[in-house]
């Protein structure tokens, strides 16, 4: 594994690949085979929109400066593991794009420039062909963490309509042909507490 470790990519996961979520079994398998190593909880240095699309699927949008600093997990991934993640995320089908993102350890300070070590990684962003539409469809509001509340109502790929491609499902969602996403229950509790 020595030579492979030098060629690992750092991947920031923010949604269903995280521990405790629906696609983490892929990451667990990659850890068992030596194709991934968990590095810890990290946050984006810049703010980005993190939204849900059709079927409560999470999307990080490549719109830096909008949204929140997003929490997620960082993994060191081998080339073989990266190919498996790219397949799951549909990078060759225009579902997601793997692009650079700067992250810092969640245990470090809030602001960069305070001694926080910034790490260059990559993340799977919503494809640019529909990212802005997802932002608009979500009322230009996102969240900082894909948690159990945001994942409530998530529909696994095998349980979604099979007569539509994922891109068609996204198009329908963005065109308002699918029901809007209600805010997670905790948003109402916060509003009442104010």
Image: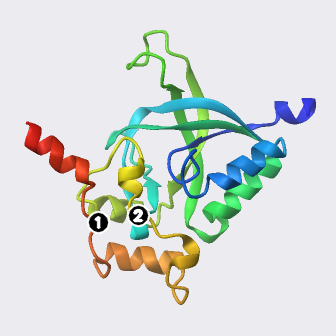
Q: How many marks?
A: 2
- Residue at the top extreme of this rendering: 115
Of residue 67 and residue 148, the one placed in the foreground of this image is: 148
Which element type, helix, strand or loop, lies under badge 1? loop
Q: Which residue sits at x=34%, y=65%?
A: 133
Picture colour scheme: rainbow
Could you classify mark 2 by the number of other residues whose Cα lies within 10 Å: few (under 14), some (14-19), or many (20 or more)? some
User: In the picture, which quadrant includes the C terminus?
Assistant: top left
> Which residue carries the number 1 mark?
181
On the image, the x and y values in percent for residue 22 come to: 56, 58
Q: Position of residue 135 (x, y in %)?
A: 32, 58
Q: Is there any visible trace of residue 35 in the rendered image?
A: no
Of the 4 image quadrants, the one containing the N terminus is top right
- Whether residues under marks 1 and 2 lie with C-beta atoms below 8 angstroms apart, the answer is yes
- 141 relative to 164, above or below: above
- The image position of residue 124, as x and y in percent, is 56, 52
- Element assignment for label 2: helix
Numbered badge on residue 35? none
Q: Is residue 107 left or right of residue 31?
A: left
Residue in the picture at 35% in, 52% down: 149
User: Is residue 31 found left or right of 50 in the rendered image?
Assistant: right
Precedes in sequence: disc 1 or disc 2: 2
The residue lying at 60 percent from left, 57 percent from top is 23
**Location of mark 2 (residue):** 56
For the residue carrying disc 1, how many other residues have a C-alpha within 10 Å: few (<14), some (14-19), or many (20+)?
A: some
């Amino acid at each position: 594994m020595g030579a492979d470790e030098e060629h690992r990519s750092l991947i920031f996961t923010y949604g269903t690949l995280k521990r405790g979520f629906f696609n983490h079994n892929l990451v667990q398998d990659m850890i068992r085979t030596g194709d991934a190593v968990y590095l810890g909880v990290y946050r984006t240095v810049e703010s980005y929109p993190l939204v849900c699309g059709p079927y409560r699927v999470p999307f990080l949008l490549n719109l830096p400066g909008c949204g929140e600093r997003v929490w997620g997990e960082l993994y060191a991934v081998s080339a073989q593991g990266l190919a498996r993640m790219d397949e799951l995320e549909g990078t060759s089908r225009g579902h997601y794009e793997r692009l650079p993102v700067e992250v810092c350890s969640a245990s470090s300070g809030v602001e960069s420039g305070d001694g926080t070590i910034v790490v260059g990684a990559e993340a799977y962003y919503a494809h640019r062909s529909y990212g802005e539409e997802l932002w608009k469809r979500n009322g230009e509001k996102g969240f900082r963490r894909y948690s159990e509340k945001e994942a409530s109502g998530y529909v696994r790929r095998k349980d979604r309509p099979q007569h539509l491609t994922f891109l068609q499902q996204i198009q329908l969602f963005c065109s308002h042909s699918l029901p809007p996403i209600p805010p997670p229950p905790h948003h109402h509790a916060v509003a009442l507490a104010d």
